[in-house]
Image: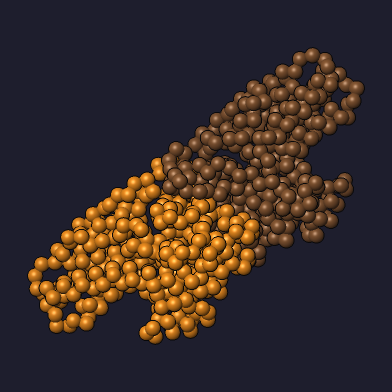
Chain colours: A orange, B brown
Amino acid sequence: MSPPTIQWLNGRVKLIDQTQLPNELKYIICRDVEALWQAIRRLSVRGAPALGVAAAFGVLLGIKTFRGNNRRKFEEHIKKVSAYLASSRPTAVNLFYGLEEMKKVVAVHPSASVAQLKKHLHQRAMELYEEDRRVCRRMGDFGAELIRSGDRVMTVCNAGALATVDYGTALGVMYSAKRKGKKFSVYACETRPLLQGARLTAWELLRGGIDTTLICDNMAATLMKQGKVDRIFVGADRIAANGDTANKIGTYNLAVLAKHHKIPFYVVAPLSTVDFKTKSGKQIPIEERHSSEVTHFGQRLTAPLKVKVYNPAFDVTDHQLITGIVTEKGVICPPFEKNIKKYAFNSR
Amino acid sequence: MSPPTIQWLNGRVKLIDQTQLPNELKYIICRDVEALWQAIRRLSVRGAPALGVAAAFGVLLGIKTFRGNNRRKFEEHIKKVSAYLASSRPTAVNLFYGLEEMKKVVAVHPSASVAQLKKHLHQRAMELYEEDRRVCRRMGDFGAELIRSGDRVMTVCNAGALATVDYGTALGVMYSAKRKGKKFSVYACETRPLLQGARLTAWELLRGGIDTTLICDNMAATLMKQGKVDRIFVGADRIAANGDTANKIGTYNLAVLAKHHKIPFYVVAPLSTVDFKTKSGKQIPIEERHSSEVTHFGQRLTAPLKVKVYNPAFDVTDHQLITGIVTEKGVICPPFEKNIKKYAFNSR
């Protein structure tokens, strides 16, 4: 199992620097909220659930420097810190979920002092950290039931330990299936432009002792046609109320291919990934990143310098293409609009 | 327009070294058949039609060293040279077509001397070179009729001047459309692992003054969903008798996406790309290349060293997914099995 992707350690945030993998397992220590913002922006820490925990830890970093006992000023300070953290990346809703959960702490303790609020906020951030660990293992157990021995499963990007505190969503399903003694193999799509599949997923699956084959994104269709893909598991950055799912660019591509080849396609995500304010995928903001991610490899230019580039970091998969959504409360099947609500608001 | 990709010059073969693009426009001079074989193998020259001409020039290089007047020995020598060249790459049928055309020269001159045969072979190679130039322009003219002003077209890999003597198949269509005054733009899929789309297609389209946007292969689906792709043009390495088409890996992916989004999908290839001995795509041998193409970028490792890799260089697109095949005799529509024969064997 991988070491924790993100930790709160003596008033600082300790992160695996994912830009250095698979070559080096290095850590970054963020002492202030600006350092964490930069780490999020340059993808040293990424993955929707990990960003939720990072946001909560970011609030803790932000309030460290607040002096005095003026609660109103403290609340304003928290708002400012939250708005700053929210500006780091626009698509993954878990980041906003983490911030919202911290704001709720303030709201439910209307007469607490600044010192007491700081304590409550710290406690809530730690709960979110533990919640992620627990929830990922639950999703893993539900999802593992979908894998049969002999299966060849496919995934894209990294929805693993490195995208969460320490277990993963789509890859958590694979870790749980392995624990249950199932034998299966994984095709990891490399995930251009930043190769999270090659750099991160292949790295952590091999560490986990799982039989893994790396492919370029454009090879998935051929494997499906050859009958070599039994099911697909992907993560999610935001799920709209109707089930439309934003995830790493290339996910929608796989979903269309899965439909054509009649292969089950599962999204694995905690219920905190559902954004009920977003009715359908059309309303999900999609982050576009710098052209140099596509035109350069490291420092090396691999395209004409003057070419235009379109570089969306995410795409949206229509709910009609999704077989099921694996959550910590079970596998949600269509009709998603109705069933997501049922799972989210019924205690199970 | 690009300079010739391949030329016969003073008893040598002069090639653009495509592994150096887009950073440098450098040439390689091949003085013997071994040097040419290596250039083909490491993809300094690639693209099905260019390989056909390269094969013919390779025979010329091979017979340079033959001494004496013994015709039987000369024929054996040609056979050996041809078998050697045929071993360079397995999928593109044009390479075998070039070799076959050279062997036919020997067959149709049963009483020619070695010296006469050398002259005839030289003449036939030059004809194949000129034929490629002529045929590409004819395909371009037929294909250009399919482009309307305002279109956004998509292509994959490089089916351009760099894949032929100097004009291109799929990109030739775009050059012809531009000459006819049509305004359109192109999305070039970068084409992992070797980035022929980014390195070669973007380079030559920009030189040709065509509005070009580079994307990663996994972004094509999103553009199609947004309604930003009006039609797709791709090249071909081998077309089976039933219309199934082998082309660069990722082509089949695009074809499935095109079907899902109801976008016309055209293959552009000379009739010499049709292999009537191959009944369907299932019989086309698919070259698998070294794992380091996927795990490394230049010298830099971008995946765990021990990960398994699947790296097919081509895929096969079922004829059912193809809207039309643009050839030098016109656009072939379904049913392909019947119509390909009609176009290939009727003089037009």
Instruction: Tell me the quarter of the image containing the N terminus of chain B.
Output: top right
Relative depth, front residue between B184 and B332 = B332
Residue A289, horizontal then vertical, whole percent: 41, 56
Q: Is residue A95 visible?
A: no
Task: Give the farthest residue toward the right.
Answer: B111
**Residue B289 screen position, x and y as percent:** 58, 42
Q: Position of residue A209 (x, y in %)?
A: 43, 55
Q: Residue at x 42, y 74 (%)?
A: A327
Q: Is residue A8 left or right of residue A253?
A: left
Tell me: B216 left or right of B147.
left
Q: Position of residue A116 (x, y in %)?
A: 13, 75
How many numbered discs? 0
Vertical placement of residue B315 versus A69, above or below: above
Q: Is residue B86 visible?
A: yes
Does A57 sit above or below residue A21?
A: below
Relative horizontal placement of residue A115, taking residue B63 as reference (left or right):
left
Q: Residue furthest top?
A: B68
Q: Can you name the residue that lies furthest to the front here?
A: A181
Residue at image coords 32%, 49%: A25
Residue drawn at x 59%, y 37% as measured from the top left:
B43
Quarter-wise, where is residue A262 in the image? bottom right
- Residue at the image point whose x is 76% and y is 38% from the top: B97
